[in-house]
Image (spheres, rainbow, N blue to C red):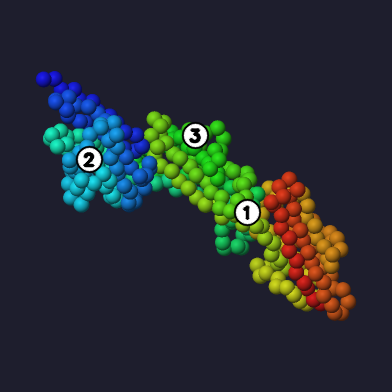
Amino acid sequence: MRRVLVVLFLGVISTGIAQAQFGGLIETSLTIELSSVSPEPNQTITASINDYAIGIVPASIRWYINGQLQTSAQNERELAFTTGPIGSVTTLSVELETVNGQVVSAGRDVRPSRIDIIMEPLTFVPDFYQGAALPSKGSAIKFTAISFTGSQNEDPTNLIYTWKVNGNLIGTGGIRGRSSIVVDDIPIRVAPDVQVTVARLSGEVIGRGKMDIPLTDPEILFYPVSTLNDITPIELASPARMLGQELTVRAQPYYLSLDTLTAPNSVEWRLDNQPLSSTLGDTYEVTLSRQGFGGSSRLQIEIQDRSNFSQRASDSFVFTY
């Protein structure tokens, strides 16, 4: 009697073989499905049986992991298991046996991977600031995807990257080698996010990455400038005391878009609500002079990008003399 063997390869970082023997004829129709399309390392996921095309009611179900019988999943249609580290392979197999002794089997290899997204906000913070730049509303942000598959020969330029922001596709779809993108203006919403799907040229999905985007508002802090034209990295607390005849103040933006910082449409200084011009050739610095022998004044600044209304900041402080 002739026997015909057909091998079916399943996609998504795994391969599988399913076979059913009925009166000596082997048919492929059983598959193993995973609760995660792209499992991550050390992740607990569920494998389940897809046997709708077979049309039989199994009398027993046996699950195996790397060839070892899983007695805790005896006669269960699902199997929960934990993937290994990056570079490992977990081999799943399942056998369905009918009351007549016929056996249907399927197998699947699971190779965990991880996709990390690195965020680089294109916003400004001063050199003396020890923290990181944060993305602000309306600023540009660079995102880079890094794939971890355990393969030494995985060339990122030969992978397909599909990017989405808030679920909306960026560009026309997946592009080969586009591991980085720059998004000029993240739509403002409660919890914006960026997502990337990485696949091989064959269409096999390696993994997916997602990152929430913590948008903030640009800020302004005021610092005194010394006679050597150096910023003293100690914020002026309101009210500030003018000890000499003059006080040079720098308004230092934080998290302002680099484009807005270097070419703002509007930087407006006001002293006691009256327009005040920068006197030092630096848009962000002014020199204040003592007015009489006692009193106080309020210094204000507003920075605005008229082409991007999300990029704006204002603040003020009081000084006494």
Residue positioned most to the right: 292
Look at discs 2 and 3 and give the one toward the viewer. Answer: 2
Helix, strand or loop status at disc 3? loop
The amino acid type found where label 2 is placed reads Ser
Image-based side of 280 in relation to 30, left or right: right
Whether residue 280 is situated above or below residue 100 in the rendered picture = below
Quadrant of image for the C terminus: bottom right
Q: Is the C-beta separation of discs 1 and 2 under 8 Å?
A: no
The local crowd at label 2, few if under 14, some if 14 to 19, many if 20 or more residues have their Cα within 10 Å, is many
- The residue at the point 75 percent across, 69 percent down is 317
Whether residue 301 is situated above or below residue 69 in the rendered picture = below
- The residue at the point 18 percent across, 22 percent down is 4
- The residue at the point 28 percent across, 49 percent down is 80
Quadrant of image for the N terminus: top left
Whether residue 273 is situated above or below residue 19 in the rendered picture = below
Query: Mark 1 = which residue?
Result: 136
Q: Position of residue 281 (x, y in %)?
A: 79, 56
Helix, strand or loop status at disc 2? strand
Query: Mark 2 = which residue?
Result: 93
Query: Mark 3 = which residue?
Result: 174
Residue positioned most to the left: 1
